[in-house]
Amino acid sequence: MEYRKIKDDEDRDADVVEADVESLRGKSLSGVSLNNKNTLGSSFGDRSKWKIKSIVTLALTLLTSSQAILIVWSKRAGKYDYSVTTANFSVEALKCALSLAALARTWRSEGVTEDNKLSTTFNEVIYYPIPAALYLVKNLLQYYIFAYVDAPGYQILKNFNIISTGVLYRIILKKKLSEIQWAAFILLCAGCTTAQLDPSSDHVLQTPLQGWIMAIIMALLSGFAGVYTEAIMKKRLSRNINVQNFWLYVFGMLFNAIAIVVQDFDAVMNKGFFHGYTLITTFMILNHALSGIAVSMVMKYADNIVKVYSTSVAMLLTAIVSVFLFNFHLSLAFFLGSTVVSVSVYLHSISKIQK
């Protein structure tokens, strides 16, 4: 009866039960019937998950911070010599190959199991085309938006993704964000924007209407695709992430192949698939591939909120790196924005997402 009562309490108020468990961990175990082996195993498991989250988040931050710089560097005389559709296809193909390589390593060490086999059911695989199609449009817009904005302007407009992710996180995953978290989101937007202000101009952005429209569409697509992908990844937590990635990237390759045929078929047939590729283009493709895998791991082991903050910190890191690469001036606005972002991250870290 006591166990049933605790379970009922857990269903009504998960946060209270979690607090009780945490308090028990801090007390002496004398008189408490617990299995020491299970406790130690849980401790090591939590520590391992924390390490995975930390490594993946750090990797995503570093990769994201160099993304905009590599895209801008890949342009020559203000335009792309290569086909952006073939570049996107190459990214998806590389991600698929890396997922298969990681999966092969798992098969050698653990054998083929129900959770890591590639074969799947129609009910499972039917969800993957949706985010793949959304990411296709979002990734194409990511290249074309640089025709209207520069790298700092792109970083400011990219902050629309913060709010769209928060709203869609609430709608799709049914997670209620606390008032502190909503305040943290607003502070994050304000901090990121302040950090990128141009002190020599009276205007925040010199962006035409087309740039704003593309940025808003990008934010909505990115937010929806990210939250939807997280829902897919966590629908079956025991499923090997490399299997889930494989099917997502297979559909990504399919949609990008269609984009090549529709948009760049003649150019690819006449000039070749890799026409205009340079070393910078290769690094950019590698960066996008590793970033995509890091994002999927964040969605599997953390959530989209972590991804949002990771990319926001990456924006500030990009500005710091630009000091050495492009003689970027660290203005007072940058330091004020960095402070606001730090406060926002702290507020989010001390609050909890409610179901």
Image (tube, rainbow, N blue to C red):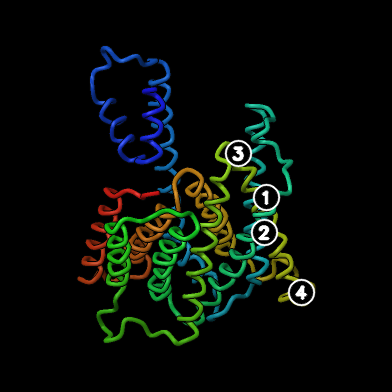
State the residue position of label 2: 129
In this view, 265 is above or below 310: below
Whether pointer 4 and pointer 3 mark residues with C-beta atoms closer than 8 Å, the reply is no
- Indicate which disc, 4 or 1, sits on the residue closer to the N terminus: 1
**Neighbourhood count class around disc 1 (C-alpha, 10 Å): few under 14, some 14–19, many 20 upward:** many
State the residue position of label 3: 240
Dot in front, 4 or 2: 2
Q: Is residue 289 left or right of residue 340?
A: right
Cα gap from disc 3 to disc 1, whole angstroms:
12 Å
| Depth check, front residue: 28 or 328 | 28
| Depth check, front residue: 30 or 330 | 30
State the residue position of label 4: 265
- Indicate which disc, 4 or 3, sits on the residue closer to the N terminus: 3
In this view, 309 is above or below 70: above
Query: For the point 26% across and 87% down, which residue is it?
Result: 202
Dot in front, 4 or 1: 1
Amino acid bearing label 3 = Asn
Amino acid bearing label 4 = Phe
Amino acid bearing label 1 = Trp
* Local secondary structure at mark 1: helix
Amino acid bearing label 2 = Pro
State the residue position of label 1: 247
Whether pointer 2 and pointer 3 mark residues with C-beta atoms closer than 8 Å, the reply is no
| Depth check, front residue: 127 or 262 | 127
Image coordinates of residue 212 in percent, x first then y, are: 45, 81
Image coordinates of residue 137 in percent, x first then y, are: 60, 70
* Local secondary structure at mark 3: loop
Dot in front, 1 or 2: 2
| Depth check, front residue: 123 or 68 | 123
Cα gap from disc 4 to disc 1, whole angstroms:
25 Å
